[in-house]
Amino acid sequence: MVNRGAVILKYKEPVLKWVTEADPSEHKAEITAEEANQERTVYLISDEDAENVDGWIRENYETLFEAELEGWYTDETLWPSKRDYKVFREWFDVECHSVVLDTVGGDISDDEI
């Protein structure tokens, strides 16, 4: 067991609407919630933060919001201008898992290094 919690954001209807409307291509394909939520980013947080995930989300929602938007479109001009905490909660359901097991047992490496 590692000393981390895991946060997963699940897309709600407003995200799906934005993905379709912001799509700059000619052939805008609508995406379903099932398709959008099939492969999700897992954000590892400290186990202490996992005990108060709502506080951690409130402190970090801007970074999370931008990371999720960038996953769809890197052109920031396509992003919604209003990205406050209220909108974040309207767009995403937050799951927090406080038990994270490392089944590999080897070193964990960072691709950015």
Image (cartoon, helix red, strand yellow):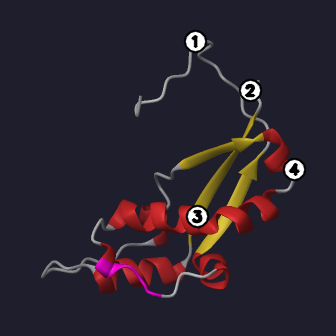
Q: Position of residue 44 (x, y in %)?
A: 64, 42
> Could you tell me which quadrant the N terminus lies in?
top right
- Other residues around mark 3 within 10 Å, as few (<14) / some (14–19) / many (≥20): some
Which amino acid, mark 4? Glu
**In the displayed structure image, the side of residue 29 where residue 99 appears, left or right:** right
Q: Determine the CA span between mark 1 and mark 2.
A: 12 Å
Mark 3: secondary structure:
strand
Give the overall secondary structure of the magenta segment: loop
User: Which image quadrant is residue 16 in?
Assistant: bottom left
Which amino acid, mark 1? Gly
What are the residue bounds of the magenta stretch?
Answer: 77-81
Which amino acid, mark 2? Val
The disc, 1 or 4, on the residue closer to the chain's N-terminal end is 4
> Could you tell me which quadrant the C terminus lies in?
top left
* Viewer-proximal residue among 17 and 6: 6
Residue marked by disc 4: 51
Q: Determine the CA span between mark 3 and mark 4.
A: 20 Å
Question: At 65% from the left edge and 62% from the top edge, which residue is drawn?
Answer: 60
Mark 1: secondary structure:
loop
Residue marked by disc 2: 2
Figure disc tally:
4
The answer to whether residue 48 is above or below residue 105 is below
Mark in front: 2 vs 3: 2
Question: Which dot marks residue 106?
Answer: 1
**In the displayed structure image, the side of residue 93 where residue 71 appears, left or right:** left
* Viewer-proximal residue among 56 and 94: 56
Mark 4: secondary structure:
helix
Q: Position of residue 27 (x, y in %)?
A: 15, 80
Q: Position of residue 32 (x, y in %)?
A: 42, 72
Question: At 80% from the left edge and 49% from the top edge, which residue is drawn?
Answer: 49
The answer to whether residue 18 is above or below residue 42 is below
Question: Which dot marks residue 10?
Answer: 3
